[in-house]
Image: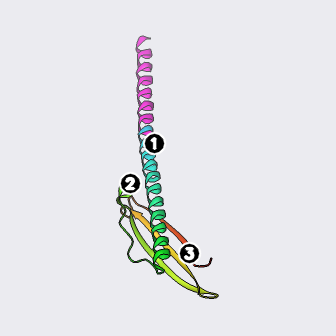
Amino acid sequence: MKRRSSGAALITALLLVGVLAAIGVAMSRLSNVEHDTRTKAVLSAKVYYGAKAGLEWAIQQVIAGGACPGAAPTLGGGLTGVTLLVNSCAPTTHGLGNTVYYISITATTGAIGTVTYAERRMEASVSSIP
């Protein structure tokens, strides 16, 4: 009888090792997903603030110069690696010579198709109407 009970203990031990291995694999995959999610959240915040900075820069250029801005500036500091693009800046005249500028800015970082890619587009309108 001891042989039968020792065989049952071996089978139980193997099943327990298999279950623990499966739990280990699942924990590893969850850890990878959590890491990717955290990375995307940081990149999303980075391009949000990059687009906001670019939009504020463009608004300042319109107010100071009365014309659409040229090439977007290079960002530094915590926004290093964020690329800005002025998608459009279209002035339109309304009423008694009041001009409204519609500005669109896109901020990107990373390579398309990778976990390190993020993009944000912001738009604003600026007018000379008092």
Membership of 10 in magenta stretch:
yes
- Residue 96, image x and y in percent? 63, 88
Residue position marked by numbered label 1 in the rendering = 30
| Label 3 or label 2, whichever comes before in sequence order | 2
**Amino acid type, mark 2:** Gly
- Residue 58, image x and y in percent? 46, 72
Magenta range is 1-26
Query: Label 1 near label 3: C-beta < 8 Å?
Result: no
Residue position marked by numbered label 2 in the rendering = 78
Determine whether 18 is above or below 49 in the image.
above
- Residue 123, image x and y in percent? 53, 71
Determine whether 103 is above or below 48 in the image.
below
Foreground disc of the pair 1, 2: 2
User: Dot 1: within a 10 Å radius of its alpha carbon, few (fewer than 14), some, or many (20 or more) residues?
Assistant: few
Look at 55% across and 71% down and name the residue there.
124
- The quarter holding residue 54 reads bottom left
- The residue nearer to you, when weighing 98 against 32, is 98
Q: Quadrant of the N terminus?
A: top left
| Label 3 or label 1, whichever comes before in sequence order | 1
Q: Is residue 119 visible?
A: no
Look at 42% across and 11% down and name the residue there.
2
**Amino acid type, mark 1:** Leu
Foreground disc of the pair 3, 1: 3
Look at 45% across and 78% down and name the residue there.
65
Query: Which label was assigned to residue 126?
Result: 3
Q: Secondary structure at mark 2?
A: helix
Foreground disc of the pair 3, 2: 3
